[in-house]
Amino acid sequence: MLTEKQLMKLRKMLIVEKEDMSKTIAAKEPVSLRDSVDELSLLSNHPADLGTELFERSKDLTLHTQHYDKLEQIDKALTQMDEGTYGVCVVCKQPIPYDRLCAIPYTNVCVEDSETVEKITEQPVLHSFREEEGVNALEIALEQGNWDAYDKEVMGEHVDVEELAIEVNDNVE
């Protein structure tokens, strides 16, 4: 269990970090793509320039979201201090070591459980390609010669190959 002196030191660290994070958020308010390009029209720019600008905007928005998330974690840690539940792992209910709290004062999990929690909260960057019964949509289209089925499968519409209509051309000799 944490001593009063340790709690006071950790509270001070959290308050300083909260102030720093609030300043960072205030200094870097997100702006629209049109405002960040600094042009009257987006059409006058080269597409590669717009791609670069779009990437930068996406990166800025991601960082902004991460800053807000960290600020929420800090607020939650301060609330837990007030409630007397600070420093206890939310997974295993064991005390979090003081050294870990000094390194990451807003954490609510111990080292052992942190990897599990990170895996749960990780968001995939890319969605996996949809496969059913070991056959993907491209293979179906190639086998059947029906690109319409491939397009629908890629767009998320399930197409049963057995239900596909076969076109009959009466002019075949």
Image (spheres, rainbow, N blue to C red):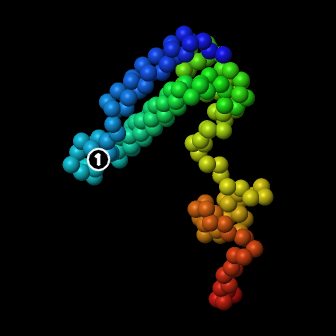
Image quadrant in which the N terminus is located = top right
Indicate whether 133 appears above or below 28: below
SS for callout 1: helix
Residue 112 or residue 128, whichever sits in front? 112
Residue type for callout 1: Arg
Quadrant of res 28: top left
Residue 3 in view in this figure = yes
Residue visible at 69% across and 79% down? Answer: 166
Q: Which residue is the site of mark 1?
A: 34
Image quadrant in which the C terminus is located = bottom right
> Please, which residue is most extreme toward the right here?
133
Task: Locate residue 110, reporting x and y percent.
Answer: 67, 23
Residue visible at 46% across and 16% down? Answer: 12
Residue 142 in view in this figure = no
Residue 75 or residue 162, whichever sits in front? 75
Residue visible at 66% across and 89% down? Answer: 170
Task: Locate residue 13, reporting x and y percent.
Answer: 47, 17
Would you say 84 lies left or right of 111 here?
left
Indicate whether 139 appears above or below 77: below
Residue visible at 60% across and 42% down? Answer: 124
Residue 3 or residue 32, whichever sits in front? 3
Task: Locate residue 55, reporting x and y percent.
Answer: 41, 40
